[in-house]
Image (spheres, rainbow, N blue to C red):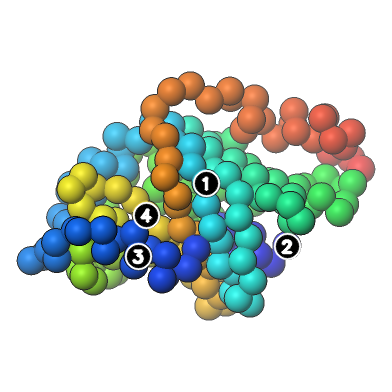
Amino acid sequence: MSMFRSLILAPVAALAAAAALALPALAAPIPLAELSRYLNGIDTLQAAFTQINPDGTIATGTIRIDRPGRVRFEYAPPDKTLVLSDGQQVAIFDPKSNQPPEQYPLRRTPLNLILGSNVDLGAAKMVVGHREEGPATHVIAQDPEHPEYGTIEMVFTPAPVELRQWIITDDAGGRTTLVLGEGRRGGGIDRNLFNIAREMELRGMTAGR
């Protein structure tokens, strides 16, 4: 399960190809205040993703986000791993095991920085990198109180602002890249999809097993 530990704790070429679709280069990176407004404006999001793991292997799947705090990663076969957050805890369901999922507090993962109820990239010591690369703006953020939790590097394209990719670096230096495909913002998502206890029940698991 080290793959997901790197994810929370799609190739760069794919992003470059998408960004090259007649987007002009910017004179400066997109301001942090504008990026914060964009992230806070996401209530729900569903999209396909491509993930590059620290060992170079590639996985694909579907992500569902219901802010604040809820996210569900469904990995496509042959992986079939399921990762979800109920807003407090993150659970990793291993399809090869009938044991209860590994769980981690969401607040101890870099994803908490974009899933929180009020994202403020301008907060002191949160952003440790903010630069333009071609048409894209890269922002590297960390928990200012706990930099040991790792960092998340977000890649945004302009006109309109869209989050296209993130790279999570864990406390051991492992880097996991996730590239978002075309997504659908807005609309309801069944809250049961983020219910860890319900997922365990569906899989015949109990907390004591």
Q: Which amino acid does label 4 sit on?
A: Arg
User: Is residue 134 shown left or right of residue 115?
Assistant: left
- Residue 189 position, x and y percent, is 53, 25
Q: Which numbered disc covers residue 164?
A: 4
Residue visible at 60% across and 76% down in the picture: 56
Sequence-first disc among 1 and 2: 2
Disc 2 or 4, which lies upstream in sequence?
A: 2
Residue type at mark 3? Ala
Q: For the C terminus, which image quadrant?
A: top right
Residue under numbered circle 1: 48
Please give the residue where the numbered disc 2 appears in the rendered image. 1
Please tell me whether mark 4 sits on a helix, a strand or a loop: strand
Is there any visible trace of residue 66 in the rendered image?
A: yes
- 43 sits to left or right of 78: left
Query: From what the image shows, is residue 62 above or below residue 196?
Result: below
Q: How far apart are marks 2 and 3 (CA)?
A: 30 Å
Q: What residue type is labelled 1?
A: Ala
Element on which disc 2 rests = loop
The residue lying at 89 percent from left, 46 percent from top is 98
Tell which circle, 1 or 3, labels the residue nearer the N-terminal end.
3
The quadrant in which residue 28 appears is bottom left
Secondary structure of residue under mark 1: strand
